[in-house]
Image: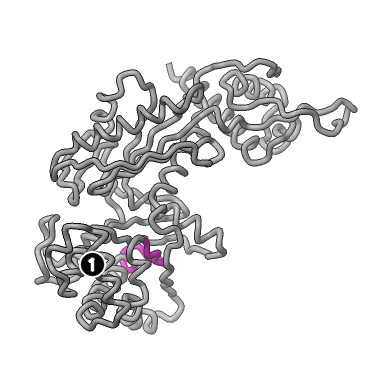
Amino acid sequence: MNAPAASADVRRSNLSLVLRYVDAHGPCARTEIAAATGLAHASVTAMVADLAERGLVEEAGAGAPGARGRPRRLLRVVHGRVWTVAVQVTHDMIKLRATDLSGATVHTDDRRHEAPFGDPEPAAREIALAVAGTVERAGSAQLGIMVIAVPGAVIDGKVGHAIGLGWRTTDLAALVNAHLPHVDCPVEVVNEANMAALAEYHALAAQGVAHPDTVVYATAHAGVGGCLIIGGRVHMGSHGMAGEIGHVPVSLDGPPCRCGAHGCLDTYVRLRALTRAAGIPEGTEESEAAARAELNRRLRAGDERARAALDTAGHALGAALLAVASVTDAGEAILGGHLVDWAPWLMPAIDARLAGRRTAIANVGFAVSTGVLGADATLRGVVHVGREHVLATPTLVPVSTPPGVGS
């Protein structure tokens, strides 16, 4: 019983190996693929035939003659064959980006979900409506996977607790699928901070930042989220909640937190806490964008209460980063979300909190970087995960032999 499964796993792995090579190096010949992957030429020929039947690769003309003097038939990936659907859920919005296998955006749909606090069903319905519209536009393209990012812990594929949305254990994938009975597409639910962290990590690396083995990511929007990246991969922990820096206690007798504890970082750094500390009228908080804009205006104008609020938040964030670094031996923190906008006012206090440790242990550095992707970070990470899923599992794409593709 185990042999067929093992054989299927090997074939799927080899298909992925060939598809990834063509994606990275195409147009390329079968002989190149065999030499680079270590697969036998006959195996490469079989893998290419399979991928061609699924419409994932196609002939791309002839290259220079090979060793035997015959022109080499080149291959390339058919990027438009598969679309991946990336969805981000915020407290009031559904943001959808559909991309092809090249990562190019082919469709967008941003809409308000107006889901009451604690009820995920209206959000699921709006996601389904956005996906249905994507299906109509996709035409003959296959939806490879739908990845939905939520602002909350994801445990065993379900939303374990999204505090900002009031969702407790929620099978969001099932709720969305119930509205899409005729759409055959895998659905994966992920944590939004993990996705943003992954995207910022790679974006900074592309700019020349040399990351240490362990990196902690902290972000703030309506609330505070975080992530641990170890060896270039998101570390999930035992329950999918590793790196949730927003709920690291930074004060023994601090304000009550929505998670049930007291003195968590979230109670000092989340937008509502900052606007209150800055003396911004309560009515402004009805709009997150308006509250943030007013806070930013006061900071730039040198308002003492606003700057004091950010100074307190910086000390709290520095204490939380120090705690995480002590436990995980992280060598870098990446600040994302609104923390990037507020970095000029946060960094002095963060550095003050880290100064003692940096001095006491001179050979152990801890760098603080700021993200570069802004509001696009989460969706960029989701797109990356969706694309990787298709490249890793090309067997999810059904057979649909295009004309004129030989083996």
Element under label 1?
helix
| Identity, as a three-letter code, of the amino acid under mark 1 | Val
Quadrant including the C terminus: top right
Which residue lies under the disc numbered 1? 269
Where is residue 74 drawn, in percent x and y? 74, 30
- Rendered position, 400 above or below 175: above
Residue 333 found in image quarter: bottom left
Bounds of the magenta segment = 325-336
Percent x, y for residue 295? 25, 70
Residue 56 as seen in the image, left or right of residue 41: left
Using residue 334 as the reference point, say whether residue 177 is left or right of it.
Answer: left
Asked if residue 333 lies in the magenta stretch, the reply is: yes
**Where does residue 317 sit, x and y in percent of width and height?**
28, 70
Residue 221 drawn in magenta: no
| Relative height, residue 152 to residue 332 (above, below) | above
Instruction: Say whether residue 282 is visible.
Output: yes
Q: Is residue 6 visible?
A: no
Q: In which quarter of the image is the N terminus?
A: top left
Q: Residue 364 sits in which quadrant?
A: bottom left
Q: Give the residue drawn at x 72%, y 34%.
A: 28
Left or right, 228 with respect to 245, comes to: right
Q: Residue at x 68, y 34 (%)?
A: 38
Looking at the picture, how far across and down is residue 202, in whole percent? 50, 55
